[in-house]
Amino acid sequence: MLIVAIFFTSAYGWAVERTAYRPLRGSTRLAPLISAIGMSIFLQNTVQLTQGARVKPIPPVLEGGLVLWDTPAFSVQISWSQMLIIVTTVTLMVAFTWMITQTPFGRQQRSCEQDRTMAALLGVNVDRTISLTFMLGAALAAVAGVMVTVYYGVVDFFIGFLVGIKAFTAAVLGGIGSLPGAMLGGLLIGLIESFWAAYLWAEYKDVATFGILCLVLMLRPSGLLGRPEVEKV
């Protein structure tokens, strides 16, 4: 299912880039953002119409785990699904960090991010680079979706909305453009939500997450591991 999900979501990523982003590439920054929100709503409603609006449960795939600490008061354990998520996340982060920093395609990505016009003048196929980047991002989203489904055991058409917003929050918290920063941001958000729900109010854990996002944007806009952009004149 992971291979099938990667194939279909990569095709979705390519199609979304061709229809919702490429025509607006020379427009203002606000236009692609509005187009992305509209495409998100379109995809959600497409899944709702084709697959139904009800929650779809799946049987447990990985059961059991390891007990790390056992006392009469409480026990600390980690499930196999949690271990799978940790190993997969670290492996993908290392692989993509190497790809972006050490491979020709990674240099093309970074050049397009810095200056698309100059990259095109130097022989970089900008359209192909951006399309492949969208496909890779969609493939990573497929891996994340499968991991979430394996862990929680349910899926519905609206499951990606809040997760997507928190993923954006994690990227901002860790630092836009930093893969280790995005991973660190996601880990911190998970810890904040867990401790907030355990010791304060579980129904306000999302409020705590977005409140921290507001503080980061006000106090450190570049994120924890991000670097402020220096524009040379």
Image (cartoon, grey):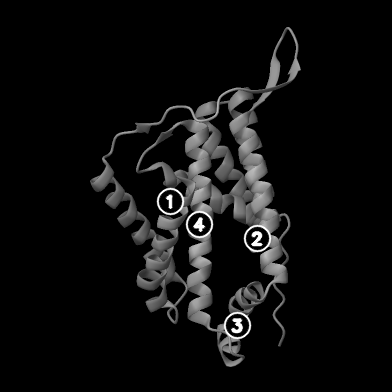
* Residue indicated by mark 2: 96
Q: Which residue is mark 3?
A: 115
Side of 114 relative to 156 (left or right)? right
Could you tell me if the residues under marks 4 and 2 are in contact, i.e. CB atoms within 8 Å? Answer: no
Which amino acid does the dot numbered 1 rest on?
A: Val
Mark 1, residues whose alpha carbon is within 10 Å: few (<14), some, or many (≥20)? few
Residue 78, compared with residue 150, is above or below; it is: above
134 vs 200: above or below: below
Single out the mark in the foreground, 2 or 3. Answer: 2
Place of residue 143 in the rendered image (x, y in percent of width and height, measured from the top left)? 52, 49
State the residue in front, 178 or 189. Answer: 178
* Near-viewer residue (164 or 54): 54
Total numbered badges shown on the rendered structure: 4
- Cα separation between marks 4 and 1: 10 Å
Q: CA distance from mark 3 to mark 4?
A: 25 Å
Distance from the alpha carbon under mark 2 to that under mark 3: 21 Å
Task: Report which quarter residue 195 is drawn in.
Answer: top right
Of the image marks 2 and 3, the number of the one nearer the N terminus: 2
Sort mark 2 into few (<14), some (14-19) or many (20+) by Cα contacts within 10 Å: some
Task: Tell me which numbered mark, 3 or 1, is placed earlier along the sequence.
Answer: 1
In this picture, is 42 found above or below 209? Answer: below
Find disc 4 in the rendering and name its residue.
139
Going from N to C along the chain, the mark reached first, 3 or 4, is: 3
Amino acid at pointer 3: Asp
Tell me which numbered mark, 1 or 2, is placed earlier along the sequence. 1
Q: Which residue is mark 1?
A: 4
**Residue displayed at 63% across by 79% down:** 111
Q: Residue furthest top?
A: 72
